[in-house]
Amino acid sequence: MWNNISCYVKKVNEDALSVYLDQLTFCVNGYGRFSQQGISSFNQFFSDDIELILVARGHSVLHTNDGEYQLAPGSLAVLRPFQIYTAICQPGEKLYYYYIHFGVSPSHLTDTYLSHIAGQCDALVVPSGQLPDFLPAFRSMLEDWRQDAPGLMTLIRSHLSLLSVHLARQLASDPAVADSEHADSNPDLQVASQALHYIAGHLNAPILQEDLCRELGISTSALYKLFRRVFHVSPSEYIAKTRLRQAEILLRSTGCTIAEAAEACGFCSASHLSRQFKVIYGLSPSAYLRRNPGEKEIRPD
């Protein structure tokens, strides 16, 4: 009987991509949903993880060193780590997206993994309709988290694997993306990336510009001019806004107190954070959170 049945069963062979993905383990460092409505329309960010973004609502323009990308509902973006990204959101429009911060293990395969799914670009953005619709799955995973359903991390890793396959197929079918090269290296952005990495790692303590200059190997005047060229603000303004931005993320995504956020982000007290917060956001932290309720972020151990 088996011989008869086998005539109708097509053999499934291993392929290079499947063998490669089987060698990897996805390490999920953060998962959740981010939302924003007309408070801040211009953000710069930097991450030491790979970040995957799936836009559910609203529009944003993402700028990288090698281009500009339009993010619309249903579009999916893969962002390389250790890059400066600038996002400009539509003023007054509500934006929210699902995100996964992750890495791969063993870590030395990270660059090869990214070349399989995103080519050589700083970011890969796939418009809505070019991939299967993963929004229902991401909504379901968020609901699983709210209900503390078991096996969520396995689901997230499974979807990362599935998305990786579809992205690799998409890249293989688009030679223009697969063959694209990095834009010429911009020395300003290279030094600015180092500066952001240092700032991100020292937000919970005073950041002296002298220490930052020593880390970068440049003078204080060169540091000031660099930040003006790249970020259009002074180093001190950038650090202050980054502290506030991190405090806002903590308050919305972890449910911590204002005092806890102040300590984590380098403010001398909760009242100091509240005063600075109101200057930038126009509202006290508590009023802001009532108007902009956030989703707690999953940060697995």
Image (tube, rainbow, N blue to C red):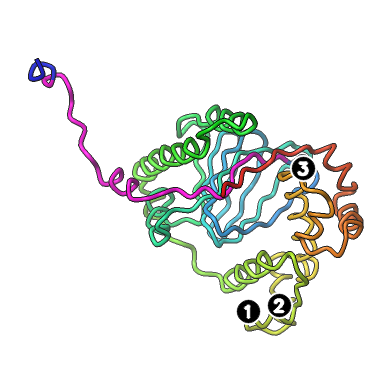
Residue at horizontal 53%, vertical 40%? 76
* Residue 278 is inside the magenta segment: no
- Residue 89 lies, with reference to residue 270, above or below; the image says above
- Residue 240 lies, with reference to residue 220, above or below; the image says above
Q: Earlier in the sequence, mark 2 or mark 1?
A: 1
CA gap, disc 2 and disc 3? 31 Å
Viewer-side residue, 71 vs 237:
237
CA gap, disc 1 and disc 3? 35 Å
Viewer-side residue, 81 vs 121:
81
Residue at horizontal 39%, vertical 58%? 106
Q: Which residue is mark 3?
A: 91
Query: Which amino acid does the dot numbered 1 rest on?
Result: Leu
Query: Which amino acid does the dot numbered 3 rest on?
Result: Pro
Structural crowding at the residue carrying mark 1, measured as other residues with C-alpha within 10 Å and reported as few (<14), some (14–19) or many (≥20): some
Q: Earlier in the sequence, mark 1 or mark 3?
A: 3
Residues rendered magenta in the picture: 6-35
Q: Which residue is mark 2?
A: 223
Structural crowding at the residue carrying mark 2, measured as other residues with C-alpha within 10 Å and reported as few (<14), some (14–19) or many (≥20): many
